[in-house]
Image (tube, rainbow, N blue to C red):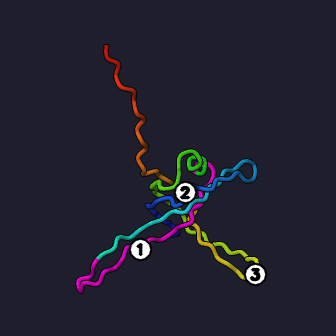
Amino acid sequence: MNKVMLIGNVGVDPDVRYVDRGVCVAQLRLATSERGYTLPNGTEVPERTEWHNVVLWRQLAEVVDKYVKKGDKLYIEGKIHTRSYEDNQGRTRYVTEIWADAMEMLTPKPQSQSPEPATA
């Protein structure tokens, strides 16, 4: 089974493009963190942050384009995909990405400020 579930923060504003026949694709960097802790012997283990390349397609990408920005907290569910390419020096490079099947926005949206009630 190839399944990934992540909760993290968007590191930079998403990159959204339209490809063949108007299909929307979004790419973003998601940071997940594990809290630091202290071992019983007193050794401090620092917080650890991992960065994930996330790819979203079609309607998910359109939602990202409209509503997601740097700093937002997201829940992402998807699959791990690894691809390779050849760089300018002819070396083979590998990229691991999460291809999202589902996304939930966890950052609360700011409430619009309502005008003060009128008094007579």
Q: Is residue 112 above or below residue 102?
A: above
Q: In the rendered structure, does residue 53 fall within the stretch colored magenta?
A: yes
Q: Single out the mark in the foreground, 3 or 2.
A: 3
Q: Is residue 117 above or below residue 1?
A: above
Label for residue 48?
A: 1
Of residue 104 and residue 71, the one placed in the foreground of this image is: 71
Q: Is residue 117 above or below residue 88?
A: above
Mark 3 — residue? 89
Q: Amino acid at mark 2?
A: Asp
- Residue at the spot 68% in from the left edge and 53% down from the top edge: 17
Q: CA distance from mark 1 to mark 2?
A: 26 Å
- N-terminal of the pair, mark 1 or mark 2, is 1
- Residue at the spot 55% in from the left edge and 59% down from the top edge: 12
* Image position of 94 (left or right of 36): right
- Residue 97 at x, y = what percent? 58, 67
Q: Amino acid at mark 3?
A: Gln
- N-terminal of the pair, mark 3 or mark 2, is 3
Secondary element at tag 3: loop
* Image position of 54 (left or right of 115): right
C-beta proximity under 8 Å, tags 1 and 2: no
Mark 2 — residue? 101
Please provide the residue range marked out in magenta: 38-60
Secondary element at tag 2: strand
Q: In the rendered structure, does residue 51 fall within the stretch colored magenta?
A: yes
Q: CA distance from mark 3 to mark 1?
A: 32 Å
